[in-house]
Image (cartoon, rainbow, N blue to C red):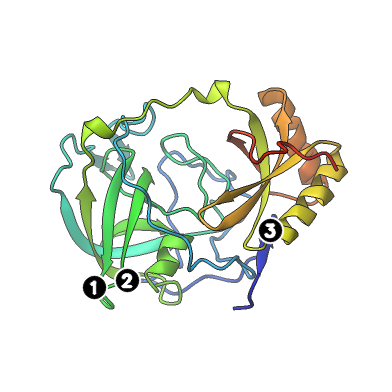
Amino acid sequence: MEAKCWLLLPLLCLGACSQSPNSGDDKRRPYTSQDGRYAQQHDAYPVDVPRLDHVTDAKVTFEPYSRQGNRDYQLRGQSYRVIKEPKGFSQEGYASWYGTKFHGYHTSNGEVYDMYAMTGAHKTLPLPSFVRVTNLDNNKQVVVRVNDRGPFHQGRVIDLSYAAAYKLDMLKQGTARVKIEVITAPQKETVLTPLKATQPLFVQVAASSDRQRAEAAGRKYAGLIGTGYQVVQDNGLYKVQLGPAKDELNAEAMIERLKHQGIHQPFKVYVEPQGNTGVNIP
């Protein structure tokens, strides 16, 4: 992989990552999905990506369960009951991963899937949950935050983000034999966070492992639609965000204008302005 590779949306994709039955070819769909929801027909991995060696495990903190995604549900004639007391829960089976097809779309608990974050999907763990995932073939471990539902394939116990799969060295194979163990944080670690409506709204369009390239992307894409931009450092990546938007409608309009410019997967994020200079105006 080249040093200082970077990714601009839309993401170019290769063909299927691997082959079934014990692979990631037939990527999972969230139980809320419908045909036509995703811009890509098949899931894939990006051609050019930022370096991910510096990406760290999800930080385990106490979080209240999400309002969305925690009800019992049915899919394809099978019923799923969300685990009420996950402390001490462990499970073995196959892990798969999901990438560009789902990047920028909503997860089952209403968040936005970022394939460069350390996250995962599980059929019945409450959302969010934190789990340690051990690759039983090479003993590599990661900690991920579960915020989605899936995978709905026999024998698979967890679907991992691209970053988590990279850290477990399972991208090429598509799947891996794993053990997952729930990590429970004490409630005393609870931190009150502001409601997202009180935070500025931006539209994220790119990520890079190189600050200068991220700044150049920010100037370019902000100039195309006549708005400001900021570059946010997050877990070793520099994320390019346009805005701030005045409101949700303004953000949606920005997204449509970006799509007309050939950027097909921008997505909304609520985040505080970064740095001493705040938002940059190209």
Q: Secondary structure at mark 1?
A: loop
Q: Which residue is mark 3?
A: 211
Q: Nearer the viewer, residue 213 or 107?
A: 213
Q: Earlier in the sequence, mark 2 or mark 1?
A: 1
Q: Name the amino acid type tagged 2.
A: Ala
Q: Nearer the viewer, residue 203 or 98?
A: 203
Taking the image as shown, residue 107 lies to the left or right of residue 244, namely left
Numbered tag placed on residue 37 in the rendering: none
In which quarter of the view is residue 226 placed?
top right
Taking the image as shown, residue 6 lies to the left or right of residue 109, namely right
* Label 2: few (<14), some (14–19) or many (≥20) C-alpha neighbours in 10 Å: many
Numbered tag placed on residue 136 in the rendering: 1
Residue contact between numbered discs 2 and 1, judged by CB atoms under 8 Å: yes
Q: Secondary structure at mark 3?
A: helix
Taking the image as shown, residue 244 lies to the left or right of residue 134, namely right
Image quadrant in which the C terminus is located = top right
> Marks 1 and 3, Cα distance to the nearest angstrom?
36 Å
Report the residue that reaches farthest toward the left: 88
Q: Earlier in the sequence, mark 3 or mark 2?
A: 2
Is there any visible trace of residue 149 in the rendered image? no
Numbered tag placed on residue 176 in the rendering: 2
Q: Residue at x 72, y 29 (%)?
A: 245
Taking the image as shown, residue 78 lies to the left or right of residue 103, namely left
Q: Residue at x 46, y 41 (%)?
A: 107
Q: Nearer the viewer, mark 2 or mark 1?
A: 1
Is there any visible trace of residue 147 in the rendered image? yes
Q: Name the amino acid type tagged 3.
A: Arg
Q: Residue at x 79, y 52 (%)?
A: 262
Q: Nearer the viewer, mark 3 or mark 2?
A: 3
Residue contact between numbered discs 1 and 3, judged by CB atoms under 8 Å: no
